[in-house]
Image (spheres, rainbow, N blue to C red):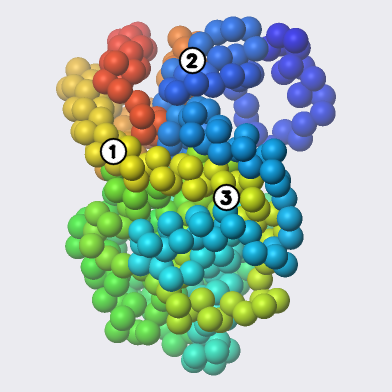
Amino acid sequence: MNSQQWIAKGDKYIMKTYGRYPLVPVRGEGCYLWDADGKRYLDFLAGVAVNNLGHCHPKVVAALQKQAAELIHCSNYYHIPTQIELAELLCNNSFADRAFFCNSGAEANEAAIKLARKYSREKFGPERYQIITAISSFHGRTMATVSATGQEKVQKFFDPLLHGFVHVPFNDADALRQAVTPATCAIMLEPIQGEGGVVVPDAEYFRQVRQICDDNNLLLIFDEVQVGIGRTGKLFAHEHFGVIPDIMTLAKALAGGAPIGTMLAKEELAESFGPGTHGSTFGGNPLVTAAGVAAIRTILEEGILNHAEEIGEYLVGELEGLKRKFPVITEVRGIGLMIGAELSVPGGEIVKKALERGVLLNVTHDSVLRFVPPLIVGKKEVDEMISILSGILAEM
């Protein structure tokens, strides 16, 4: 079947929850995708920061193939070796002592919300349940994570929302401090806001956030679903700010493209999740955790972090060059390969024109071009994308 035929069939059977582009990917390798008609695309979206090792990385593919031939799924009533191995890798390379596995970033954030509330109830009583999050944040599509998200467009039509969430401006420690009440149990933030427009806070901001938490016996939750696993040139984005959370959530890039999420926590908090308090049928099954082990080991052992930092600096420099040439770009910001270019106009048309010319880009917050290519991207691919983007901007 060709692309047009697949799209027609999808329009008949798939719920229209996505504004899909007319692209039918059928194969991927490294930084490139091919559609059902054989056309090649340079991918600077990477499945929305999922394919950090590129498409079909050989070590992830080998791990999936090997595990699929041995054991795909079993119950979490039993001990799963690859799950244990992945938990050990994550804990040994982070602040955390324990991991809980699930299937997505939203589920990881749900787990963090539940753990924060349960721990606070046990330690301080039932009156402490409120969680402060940021305006323009994005934490997921479930009812709890929609309620935590600070974007009206995500919450629209789903009232009544789950109560107990307060939203304050991001990168504003004073507003955060003023929002704390005796009912507050935790502060939940993205180290860099992704869906909110690739917003990077001031260096001092998170140090003040950590101090606010310490002064008020609050838990600090970092949502690293999009920015974790090497995206910023460090394994976890909060490392750039020198601040340690109490709970962290991960998903997207954790298993090289396989669906997984995890919540990491310190021992004292993890003790609140005893048998029966939370669970996930597919969470941390043998197949996805085998992929996760392969992905994390590759990132840690093959210089991926340093490469992401180096190429990120190169990409920012090239985008700054476009900014000097085209006033429609008003700001370039980001860390590593989590980069945004703020526009003075909506960016949807640029994304469409790039797609037509064989480059996959993304716009978030309406007017921010978001660049989250695979971490293995090279200068050659950056130059190819910049050349096409430059041509589009010149036409504008």
Which label was assigned to residue 303?
1
Q: Earlier in the sequence, mark 2 or mark 3?
A: 2
Identify the disc placed on residue 41. 2
* Label annotation for residue 289: 3
Amino acid type, mark 1: Gly
Image position of 13 (left or right of 352): right
Residue pictured at 44% horizontal, 87% vertical: 182
C-alpha separation, residue under disc 1 versus residue under disc 2? 26 Å
Does residue 170 appear left or right of residue 203 in this picture?
A: right
Secondary structure under tag 1 reads loop
Q: Residue flagged by tag 2: what amino acid is it?
A: Tyr
Percent across and percent down for residue 259 are 60, 44
Indicate the position of residue 362 as horizontal and vertical percent values. 45, 29
Mark 3 belongs to which amino acid? Thr
Which is more toward the observer, 180 or 53?
53
Residue 121, above or below 332: below
Query: Which residue is rendered at x = 43% and y = 58% of the image?
Result: 90
Q: Is residue 104 visible?
A: no
All told, the count of numbered labels is 3
Asked whether 315 or 143 is in front, the reply is: 315
The 10 Å Cα crowd at callout 1, few under 14, some 14 to 19, many 20 or more, is few
224 over 259 or under it: above or below: below
Q: Quarter-wise, where is residue 309 in the image?
A: top left
- Mark 2 surroundings: few (<14), some (14-19) or many (≥20) residues within 10 A: many
